Amino acid sequence: MKTNINQELFKRYNPEKKLEIIENLTQEELLATTPATITRVVKEAGEGRKSSPNKYLRIRLSLRKGNNWNSMFDGVGIHKKKLYVSLYVQMDSTDTENNEYYSKFFARGERYRGTCQESDRYGNPNYHYFYYNDDDKADCIKSILLEYVNRKYLDQQNAQADGKL
């Protein structure tokens, strides 16, 4: 039976059940996650000023996924009502952060190819490329969903258990 994560994620299940559902999703089910679902996830669990519509959901290090080569998926955010992803890219001598629109990064059936430019000591541009195929994109979506459940529910449960709330 095919699971629709766009509906299952927001049902009234306990957090452990939601984590189990997310872990058992196939690549096709993960890639069927809509931008509206990710927008809701960022609005509910993202950080930012309380009155501002701009939010950012940073993925914690233990949940970050990448292309197993030279970049990591850092987080997802909303800025000026546009959804974007943030990627940490490792180059020869420096590291950088690259932002891309969500719709371009998660385009169906296409491998995402990103570019970063740095200059050598003579000022000549050097281009560095990084690629994300459908497997990598599915892992990135899974890390977003896991971070959402951890931040929204499990952190609250831990705080209640410690007597802070």
Image (tube, rainbow, N blue to C red):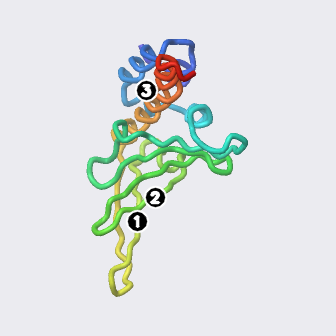
Q: Residue at x 73, y 42 (%)?
A: 51
Q: Which of the 4 image quadrants contains residue 34?
A: top right
Secondary structure of the residue carrying numbered label 2:
strand
Q: CA distance from mark 3 to mark 1?
A: 31 Å
Q: Position of residue 100 (x, y in %)?
A: 51, 54
Q: Which callout, 1 or 2, points at the residue further toward the start of the chain?
A: 2
Q: Mark 1 and mark 2 in contact? Answer it, CB < 8 Å.
A: yes
Q: Is residue 25 left or right of residue 52?
A: left
Q: Position of residue 129 (x, y in %)?
A: 35, 62
Q: Which callout, 3 or 1, points at the residue further toward the start of the chain?
A: 3
Identify residue type, mark 3.
Glu
Classed neighbour count for the residue bearing mark 1: other residues with Cα under 10 Å, few (<14), some (14–19), many (≥20): some
Q: Which residue is mark 2?
A: 98
Q: Which residue is mark 3?
A: 29
Q: Compared to 37, does 100 lie above or below?
A: below
Identify residue type, mark 2.
Asn
Q: Which residue is mark 1?
A: 116
Q: Residue at x 46, y 30 (%)?
A: 145
Secondary structure of the residue carrying numbered label 1:
strand
Q: Residue at x 36, y 25 (%)?
A: 26
